[in-house]
Amino acid sequence: MDHFLVVPGRKGKTRSVMSLFRDRVDAGHHLADVLLAHAGLGGGEVVVLGLPRGGVPVAAVVGRALGAPLDVILVRKLGVPSQPELAMGAIGEDGVLAKNVSVMEAAAVTDADLEASARRERVELERRARQYREGRPRLDLRGRSAVIVDDGIATGSSARAACSVARAHGASRIVLAVPVGPEPTLSALHDVYDDVFCVASPHSFSAVGEWYDDFSPTSHAEVVELLRDSA
C-alpha cells in the first residue's frame, strides 16, 4: 500500500500525503512504524493509552511494537450548560478535573457549574473504568511518557480532554499519536501535547471512517479482551 508519513517537529509542524488503512489493526502497524522511527520513545518509561473504544485496537498494536504497557484513558468532556457540545473542561479518574479557562470565561461559567457537571459525569466514568479493567488499577503515569492513541481525529475535543487528563495524572511527556486527522485540528491542539505523530493528514477531510476500508464499531468485549491480554 502506498502511504505517506506525517512527521511533525516539536509542537506540530507537519508534512503530509494521502493514505488508506484496511482496518484499525493495519492502522496501528503504520502508526507504530512512525513512532518507532521518529518519536524517540526508547529512552524512558512509556505507557500507551487508547481512547475507548475505537482507539484501543490501534493502541494495542502500538503498545506491542513499543514494548510498552497498554491502558485506556477514560475521560468525560464537560459541556457548557447552554452549549453542551462546547467543552468547558474534562474529568479523568482519581478525581482529576481539567478546566478550559478561556471557554469558562467566555461562557460566564462558574467553578460551581463545572463541579456540578463533573459530579454527574463521574458516575459514568467510574462505571466504565470498572467494566474495562475488570478491577485492575489504572497504570501510574507519574514521570512517564504517555502515548495517547485514537483511531483518528476529527474535531479534536476527545484528544484535548485526554491529553489534559494525562498531564494532570503526572505524565512527563504527552505524545498524541493517530493514524489520520486534519492538520488544522492537530495544530490547534499544540497547547496540550508535547509531540504529535500522524500517518495521514489529508487536505480534504470529512470523517475518520472514510480513511478505513473497515471502520466497524469496536465492541466493549474487544476492549476488555485487549486490556486483559496486555495485563
Image: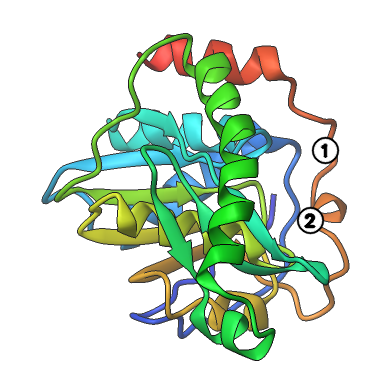
Q: Position of residue 117 (x, y in %)?
A: 63, 53
Crowd rating for badge 2 (residues with CA inside 10 Å; few <14, some 14–19, many 20+): some
Closer to the chain start, of discs 2 and 1, is 2
Image quarter of residue 17 = bottom right
Q: Position of residue 218 (x, y in %)?
A: 74, 27
Looking at the image, residue 176 lies above or below residue 24: below
Q: CA distance from mark 2 to mark 1?
A: 9 Å
The amino acid on which the numbered mark 1 sits, given as a three-letter code, is: Phe
- Position of the C terminus, as image quadrant, is top left
Q: Which residue is mark 2?
A: 208
Q: Which residue is mark 1?
A: 215
State if disc 1 and disc 2 touch (CB < 8 Å).
yes
In-front residue for pair 80/77: 80
Q: Position of residue 73 (x, y in %)?
A: 47, 40
Q: How is the image coloured?
A: rainbow
Q: Position of residue 146 (x, y in %)?
A: 32, 49
**Left or right of 42 in this view: 114:** right
- Can you tell which mark lies on residue 185? none
Secondary element under disc 1, as helix, strand or loop, is loop
